[in-house]
Image (cartoon, rainbow, N blue to C red):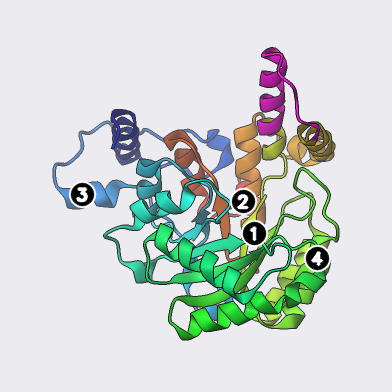
Amino acid sequence: MSKKTHLGRRRFLKESAFGLLSASIATKGVWARTRKSTLADSRETKANSQPKIKAFRTLGRTGFKVSDLAIGSVYEEGLFGTMLDAGFNYIDTAESYPRHHGVVAKAIKGRDRKSIFISTKMEVKKDPSKEDFLKRTRKALEELDTEYIDCMMMHCPDKPEILKTEGFHAAMQQLKSEGRLRYVGISHHGSFWLKAPEEPMHKILLAAADDGRFDVFLMSYNFLQMDQAEQVLKVCKEKSIGTALMKSSPVSKYFGLKSRVEQLEKEKKEIDSLYKEGLARFKDKYDRAEQFIKKYDLKSPEEIREAAIRFVLENPNVNTVCCSLKTYDELERILPLSGSKLSDWERKN
């Protein structure tokens, strides 16, 4: 563990022991430090003082009790471990995430594997075969250093026809029979991506629900994408399909992409046309989010993100929300949102 990582985790544990966060946006996400006693020396006291996940929901027909907040794209190993210690037990990864399988492997090493749900993803490429899917899944198993994968997802298919790819399903069935795979899922970004999808998310996911071979959906749902996504979530509830969310904060991508483009402009480097198109798309979403931002008097990207997560947790058909974090400061703000609802905060203000 690097010195920076060690200090970040130590500060997280120390500050959380001084007083757990008051779980409301009104506190502006700052840890409540109402008590200035020293940390007890015993490991038991330290473990009890660390903030924990407060709520767990059943992940559809899998029956797995999943933390309402999940681990998304987290690369810092110390931070990843701290999240697992805090009760995060759903991990979202993909073969296309550079080096992420290896990060997951190190984080879960020595832990109770049955207490963790690992979901990874692969795209359906041109002219796919059963052998290709088997080879790629076995590579993922090796990279993750695990005996089995809880869920393999078909990653962001462009149209419903791809759902029927027999090579994929034949491979998944064989892996299940070998005990190397438990469930099959599907992911979709919806319109919250750099390029517009060929077909709308709800059309593809509703077709996947009708197909019957997909156990878990990873989907986009937020306060800007409601009606169609809520239709999918309702069907998932009816068919006992597990639901995990991404893109729960519809303007986070805008802030990140805007910062990246501004940096490229400052360095006088060429800006990819995909970045330009994406920035224009996300700027439109930010403009549409202003009503939500003004209603709750949100003053920063952090406050917007927190309110957005509270919003999606309000929906009982949502099982878990993936959180991509880079720092312990972000974890300090996000972890207290577990078990919360936007309406709870709204009633206090």
Q: Whole-percent x and y of residue 143? A: 42, 57
What span is in magenta? 256-273
SS for tag 3? Answer: helix
Q: Earlier in the sequence, mark 3 or mark 2?
A: 3
Q: Which residue is mark 3?
A: 45
The amino acid sitting under disc 2 is Arg
The residue positioned 46% from the left and 43% from the top of the image is: 75
Q: Is residue 98 left or right of residue 9?
A: right
Q: Which residue is mark 1?
A: 314
The Cα atoms of the two marked residues, 2 and 1, are separated by 6 Å
Other residues around mark 1 within 10 Å, as few (<14) / some (14–19) / many (≥20) = some
Q: Is residue 335 above or below residue 32?
A: below
Q: Which residue is mark 2?
A: 310
Q: Is residue 159 above or below residue 215?
A: above
Q: Earlier in the sequence, mark 4 or mark 1?
A: 4
The amino acid sitting under disc 1 is Glu
Q: Whole-percent x and y of residue 254? A: 72, 35
